[in-house]
Amino acid sequence: MTSIATVQHQAGLVFNQMASKYDDTFTRSMIGRAQRDAVWRVLTKIFYPGDHVLELNCGTGEDALFLARNGISVTACDASEQMVRVASNRLRTEAPDAPVKFNLLPTERLHDLQSATLFDGAFSNFSGLNCVADLKKTADELAALLPPKAPLLICLSTRFCLWEMAWFTLHGNLGKAFRRCSGHTVAKVGELPVNVYYPTVRKLQTLFSPSFALRSCVGIGVTVPPSYVETWIRSHPKMLNMLRAIDNVVSTCRGIRVLGDHVLLHLERVQS
């Protein structure tokens, strides 16, 4: 039986491999920028200057630095030592006075987080929580860190991504085309495997209740494609602009919003 500590260590090793190239391959890519901008539009409506926000799975610190530029303090955590190292270097060079603190802390060990006061909200972007096997435990531990009415924003990979199904089917790879549909897959980064889970929105509502209630749901990358389509999209920049405009219209439509690359849930801490 695989222990939780082994799973945490494996996830950290996997993302260590990605850290040095992550900003070049995703953060600064056209698709990455388009999807992140869509998330940021929601963040700026939920979090306000003066807030102190907890970020899970912070990666290279792009979102934490954005929040800091908007007057928001951030305690940011990640399971990958190399991701935290890149984020800390960015903080020193890009915004040394920003109210951000990066911590090496897997989501599975939130109970180890030392905080003198409750946070004003919490946030996790781009599929970090898809690598957490026990989201019910995460929800319970987040509930202990947030006061009633505090927002929790989580962005996860969806179970059914139309772009992924179509793209890999056209390229003759049915295994990848439908890899999310069962709700669980084992992805390989180099030679290292990592378990990835794809809960539905309804399942997430169940896992985060009764401590959290769903307030809104927005599709991220409904018509904007996943990041592995970057090479193609760079040859069709006008197409990307059109797809971004369509996303702005359909991203909140029921039935459609859950068929993109990611979905962004706004949950609210409720009184137990």
Image (spheres, rainbow, N blue to C red):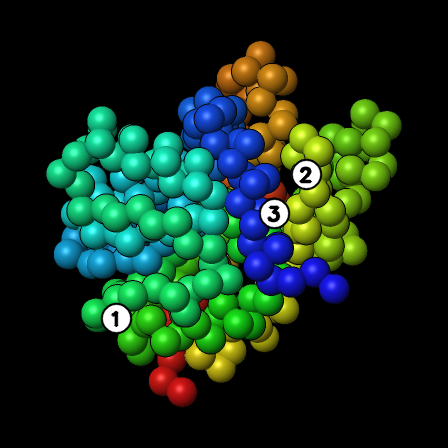
Which one is earlier in the sequence, the residue at label 2 or at label 3?
3
In this rendering, would 201 be left or right of 95?
right
In what quadrant of the picture does the N terminus appear? bottom right
Between label 1 and label 3, give the one nearer the viewer. 3
In this rendering, would 103 be left or right of 155?
left
Q: Amino acid at mark 1?
A: Leu
Q: How many marks?
A: 3
Q: Quadrant of residue 119?
A: bottom left
In this rendering, would 90 be left or right of 181?
left
* Crowd rating for badge 2 (residues with CA inside 10 Å; few <14, some 14–19, many 20+): some
* Crowd rating for badge 1 (residues with CA inside 10 Å; few <14, some 14–19, many 20+): some
Mark 2 and mark 3 residues within 8 Å of each other at the beta carbon: yes
Where residue 267 appears, as percent x and y from the top left, is 43, 67
- Between residues 135 and 248, which one lies in front from this camera angle? 135
- Between residues 105 and 207, which one lies in front from this camera angle? 105
- Residue holding disc 2: 192
Query: Residue drawn 73% across and 57% down?
Result: 183
In the figure, 43 relative to 167: above or below? below
SS label for mark 3: helix
Q: Quadrant of residue 243?
A: top right
- Distance CA(mark 2)–CA(mark 3): 8 Å
- Distance CA(mark 1)–CA(mark 3): 30 Å
Q: Amino acid at mark 3?
A: Gln
In the figure, 135 relative to 224: above or below? below
Mark 1 and mark 2 residues within 8 Å of each other at the beta carbon: no
- Residue holding disc 1: 118
Q: Is residue 216 visible?
A: no
- Residue holding disc 3: 10
- Between residues 176 and 160, which one lies in front from this camera angle? 176
Query: Residue drawn 30% across and 37% down?
Result: 88
SS label for mark 2: strand
Between label 1 and label 2, give the one nearer the viewer. 2
